[in-house]
Amino acid sequence: MLTSADLQAIGLTLRVAALTTLILLIVGTPLAWWLARTKSWMKRPLSAIVALPIVLPPSVLGFYLLVLMGPQGPVGQWTQSLGLGLLPFSFSGLVVASVFYSLPFMVQPIQTAMEALGDRPLEVAATLRASPLDTFFSVVLPLCKPGLISGVIMSFAHTVGEFGVVLMVGGNIPGVTRVVSVQIYDHVEAMEYADAHRLAAIMLGFSFVVLLALFTYNGTRRKGVST
Amino acid sequence: MTVLTKLSKAGAIAIAAVLLSAGSTHAEVAHVAVASNFAEPIKALAISLEKTTGHQIKVTLGATGKFFAQIKNGAPFDALLAANAETPAALELDGFAQPGSRFTYATGRLVLWSADPVLVDGKGDVLRQGKFRKLAYAAPKVAPYGAAAVQVMENLGLQTLLAPKLVQGESIGQTFSFVFTGNAELGFVAMSQVLEGGQLKSGSMWEIPQPLYNPIAQDAVLLKRGANNPAAQALMALLKTQASKDLIRSYGYAP
């Protein structure tokens, strides 16, 4: 059914999405915690920056990444001085772009869960002489599990569905930057509609199943199933 | 009240006069799909069209293959300036274009270009030496300049050597942006993208000799939707004038 090129694109897409989600979990959780607890004036500007990818066209992000990561751009000169070479047209470049692109989808659900927590669990933990770090790992994270799971599912799915940014900084290299969405685009461009249909149907099915799982999970939780 | 009616009458007459005068010049607008490589010349041609006839064209730039699919699916274009001869012919065959309106408006030339002023030599040896990270070309299935680039690599016997370094732009316009920003050190682009007034704008280039690829005959065609659009017809006529041919040549197209 699927060609080897299609399978390669699917494998690459899953790898990009998995790595992006892992990085976002590590970076996004402390960021969400800071945003949830801070009284600083920085909170609103930072929240706005985190939310930017929701409203920015991918072409804007793609264009800036191409210019900034290029050999003349500040990011490009920095990556070259570190001996990493240049990010566009590479797997790592795709992951970096995806981390920016899916950031709000990880941070926002976690931040919402943390804000809903309130001060009480933290005060209780403090009276029991738990250190802040201990409190974070043994009280905050377990209580915020639904937010974390939503963040992971949403950022994974959002990265799988990425297209515009990849088209602009990817260079369409098989096995390196040719993800499923770009592969579908290529099939349509070349008028290979049967090939496009097969992959598009898989994407549609995947997206539906992911969202159904997410809503089912959130629904059963709200019914008061004990955590 | 009578003053008001007089005023409104006067107003109506004034509006009618404006409408009539606008109608008498028959200034029309045509929507034209133009291959990315022709971005610069079409700007100059649009200005001269408006000066000489008053007609305006609205230009959409893109890859020829994409326009083919869009036009077949009812995209509202009056004319197509393609990057090849096959697409206009296919559109005529499928009944989307005016029969007999096809003609070659430009012959495209492929160059190997770098934003670095010393990287590309006059013989293309840089391709063999491989002292670069990435080489950009346009998607060969949809962009004729990309197909020509593949011919060049095959005829030089370098496709296996170059394969790991290739990056693909979805149109010749995007391919140029990869090279212009330096993300790809080298790229196969249209000569029209790097020349201005017959001079190389910046960087370094190799004019690829003709035996290495088939000439890229670029045909224009009047589409069914624009068959009776005076602006589209005027553009077709303008493209055939000697002045336009000279102008197009100065942008890096073969005579």
Image: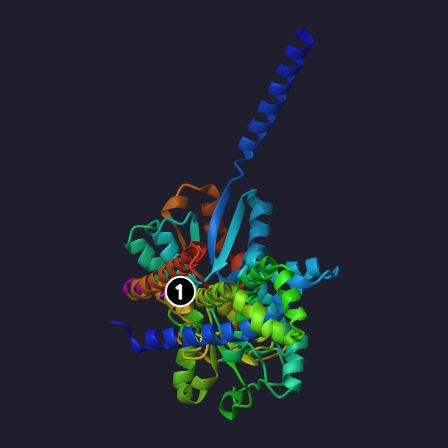
Where residue B25 appears, x then y in whole percent? 55, 35
Residue B142 colored in magenta in the image? no
Q: Chain of mark 1?
A: A
Instruction: For mark 1, give the secondary structure.
Output: helix
Per the image, the residue denoted by label 1 is A185
Furthest-front residue in view?
A: A128
Point 50% across, 58% down: residue? B61
A50 with respect to B224 (left or right): right
Point 49% across, 80% down: residue? B208
Quadrant into which the N terminus of chain B falls: top right
Of B233 and A141, which appears nearest the observer?
Answer: A141
Where residue B3 appears, x then y in whole percent? 69, 9
Which quadrant of the structure image shows residue A103? bottom right
- Count how many numbered circles sit on residues in the image: 1
Of B240 and B221, which appears nearest the observer?
Answer: B221
Q: Is residue B191 visible?
A: no
The crowd level at tag 1 (other Cα within 10 Å; few <14, some 14-19, many 20+) is: some
B225 with respect to B3 (left or right): left
Q: Which residues are magenta?
A: A189-194
